[in-house]
Amino acid sequence: MTTFAIVGSGWRAEYFWRLAAALDGVTCVGVVSRRPRDLPVPVYPSLDECLAGARPDFVVTAVPWSVTPGLVVDLVGRGVPVLAETPPAPDLAGLRELWAKVGGSGLVQVAEQYTRMPAHAARIALVRSGAVGDPTRVDVSSTHQYHAVSLIRTLLGVGRGPARVRAVRTTAPLADPIQRDGWADPVEVKRATTTIATIEFDGGGFGVYDFTDNQWHNQLLTRRLLVRGTSGELRDHEVVRLAGERTIVRSEVVRRQTGYDLDLDGFDTDHITFGDEVLYRNPYQGQRWNDEEIAIATLLEDTAAWVADSGPEPYPLADGVHDHRVALAIGDAADSDAPVDVGDEPWR
């Protein structure tokens, strides 16, 4: 059994203790909260009391951006492995300082879950199978900043090398019918900002970043993802590819979702396929979890395996720093209307 504690008790932290309750081999043994809370796990008023009383194998930090770096440094100083919510630091100065203090510790992972979402995990498996050849370009219009950069890098298969970023911002009126806390009543048309950036990775690989305010929740904005390879491309759930001489074929990536119509098995994700190839199979069938919950549960189990020396690092700090460094460069490029270069070591 691998145990963990959480620092923070907000909406993000709740995912971790709630999902862990349904997992075998991973247990949440405590939450650090400055305010008394009635939770299904023990609540401690301080980190000292939590570490002494619960003795977790690792700690999840789910606190405001500005608090995360100092907390990570404190935990590493105590020799405690950390899974830090994104981003690991709020700005470039914070990233540099954090890396200088804990970059060589090998104790810090970043809670970047997007590549573990079922649809994205299936796309990654498809691209790695060679179905569209060698990936050369990835366009992401669905999520923001470091999450989008993580998807672009992973689908391209590029590491943490140099990149050149160009970006622009535009604003336009847009209805905003729903936020995280629910539907707007009445719906208002507001000014929404769209940021579009290109990322050229050293040695090949091109990314396009496209994000509009509140795109996570505003269902008027469709999500789009494209991976272009040397012999075809994946667009959302459709693949066009060169299958042979004078033979171009179109195929679908198909998600089997139970619970529709007369399917009485209950609403759940079963698997995602490409032809007769299973790209992804839901390891938590029966839980009825959404994609975010599946991804976070997978990340928790991967982190537990890493802490127990039975699995690889789920998402090393260097990757999280690099993703956020490129995301910050997108903002800098949009502000300056000039290219921004990210060097060999993204924290520099």
Image (cartoon, rainbow, N blue to C red):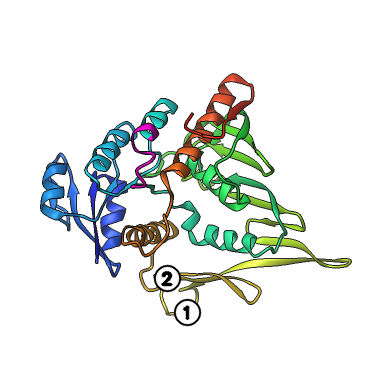
Earlier-in-chain disc, 1 versus 2: 1
Q: Residue furthest right?
A: 246
40 lies left or right of 303? left
Numbered label attached to residue 347? none
Q: What span is colored magenta in the figure?
A: 99-107
| Residue matched to label 1 | 263
Q: Which mark lies nearer to you, 1 or 2? A: 2
Seen in the picture, residue 285 relative to 236 is either above or below; the reply is below
Seen in the picture, residue 275 relative to 49 is either above or below; the reply is below
245 lies left or right of 52? right
As helix, strand or loop, the secondary structure at mark 1 comes to loop
Residue at image x 38%, y 32%?
Answer: 100
Q: Quadrant of residue 220?
A: top right
As helix, strand or loop, the secondary structure at mark 2 comes to loop
| Residue matched to label 2 | 283
Q: Residue flagged by tag 2: what amino acid is it?
A: Pro
Q: Are marks 1 and 2 in contact (CB under 8 Å)?
A: no
- The quadrant in which the N terminus is found is bottom left
Q: CA distance from mark 1 to mark 2?
A: 20 Å
In reply to whether residue 105 is colored magenta, the answer given is yes
Query: Where is residue 219 shown, x and y percent of the image?
Result: 52, 48
In depth, the one of 170 and 282 nearer the eye is: 282
User: Label 1 crowding class (10 Å Cα cut-off): few <14, some 14-19, many 20+?
Assistant: few
Query: Where is residue 149 shown, x and y percent of the image?
Result: 54, 42
Residue at image x 30%, y 44%?
Answer: 62
Residue at image x 60%, y 28%?
Answer: 341
